[in-house]
Image (cartoon, helix red, strand yellow):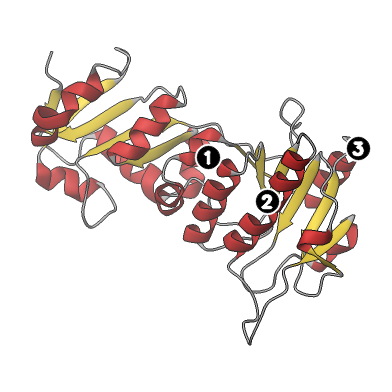
């Protein structure tokens, strides 16, 4: 059965998509996110999320959409849009002719940890969406269980971050925390070693003992990890840099340390 077709951009469901796309507080209130592009839609479906609605152009439906809809539950609304209307509701300059509204539970408090995680990352006031997206993708690749975002972080569910994760965001638990001190105290009670990154850290990152369970704090692009968090860390590590380069991109720094952690973990079993 062919999807319904909407001919007006003023339809309430299209207005809902735009508000979810543009408004962080509205996303939290509604517990939904706006997703654009076949790759992100596919990864959300693979993660078990059921879309509330899927939008696509008739051209996309005829060329590829029928394959998508065969995998989508019958409870999902399927809607065809003209290219003009589709281009008006999405954010990207070169739209990919498919978009969707997915449920997304946002964790805004220091709620209890996942079931016995071994490796978590704490993003401290990370503000660049591309940086956040790359950090999420890197964390997933390194086997991180949970990413905690402190107050002051860019929205991990914004459209720019979603695109930068290339769909990996649906493979990790993300929790936004209001009290980082309480979070660290809870992690320590669970037996976690808290590791902070800092340019002046007393230990080169390769010399540290990364015994699990472990929490790695990655700092703000300009100012690094907050001073009060460094004082609460069990270990402060640095990545020695050559020449006149003062610092690395936060996601790059996290990747270097995370894969050293994984290297040490692998070495224990060889």
Residue plotted at (61% across, 44% down): 142
Toward which corner of the image does residue 146 lie, by quadrant?
top right
For disc 3, the marked residue is: 189
Q: Residue at x 56, y 63 (%)?
A: 127
Mark 1 to mark 3 CA distance (whole Å): 29 Å
Residue at x 50% of width, y 52% of height: 133
Image coordinates of residue 224 in percent, x first then y, are: 70, 69
Q: Nearer the viewer, residue 164 or 80?
A: 164
Mark 1–mark 2 distance (CA, rounded to whole Å): 30 Å
Q: Which residue is mark 1?
A: 28
Q: Is residue 200 left or right of residue 94?
A: right
- Which of the two residues, 4 or 174, is positioned nearer the viewer here? 174
Q: Quadrant of the C terminus?
A: top right
Badge 2 marks a residue whose secondary structure is helix
Quadrant hosting residue 69: top left
x, y (%) of residue 170? 49, 35
First along the sequence among labels 1 and 3: 1
Residue 68 can be seen, yes or no = yes
Secondary structure of residue under mark 3: helix
The dot on residue 258 is 2
Left or right of residue 1, residue 138 in this image: right
């Amino acid at each position: 059965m062919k999807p319904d077709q909407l001919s007006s951009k003023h339809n309430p469901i299209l207005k809902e998509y735009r508000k979810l796309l543009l408004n962080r507080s509205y996303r939290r209130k509604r517990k939904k996110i706006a997703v654009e592009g076949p790759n992100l839609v596919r990864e959300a479906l693979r993660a078990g999320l059921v879309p509330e609605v899927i939008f696509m152009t008739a051209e996309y439906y005829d060329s590829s959409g029928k394959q998508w809809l065969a995998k989508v539950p019958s409870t999902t609304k399927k809607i065809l849009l003209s290219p003009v209307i589709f281009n008006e509701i999405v954010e990207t300059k070169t739209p990919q002719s498919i978009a969707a509204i997915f449920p997304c539970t946002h964790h805004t408090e220091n709620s209890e940890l996942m079931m016995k995680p071994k490796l978590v990352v704490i993003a401290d006031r990370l503000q660049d969406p591309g940086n956040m997206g790359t950090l999420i993708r890197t964390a997933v690749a390194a086997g991180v269980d949970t990413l905690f975002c402190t107050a002051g972080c860019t929205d991990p569910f914004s459209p720019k971050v979603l695109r930068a994760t290339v769909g990996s965001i649906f493979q990790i638990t993300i929790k936004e925390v209001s009290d980082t001190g309480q979070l660290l105290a809870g992690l320590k009670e669970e037996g976690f070693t808290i590791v902070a990154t800092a340019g002046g850290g007393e230990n080169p990152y390769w010399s540290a003992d990364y015994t699990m369970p472990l929490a790695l704090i990655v700092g703000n692009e300009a100012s690094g990890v907050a001073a009060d968090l460094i004082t609460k860390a069990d270990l402060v590590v640095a990545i020695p840099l050559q020449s006149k380069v003062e610092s690395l991109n936060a996601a790059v720094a996290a990747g270097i340390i995370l894969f050293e952690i994984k290297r040490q973990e692998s070495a224990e079993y060889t």
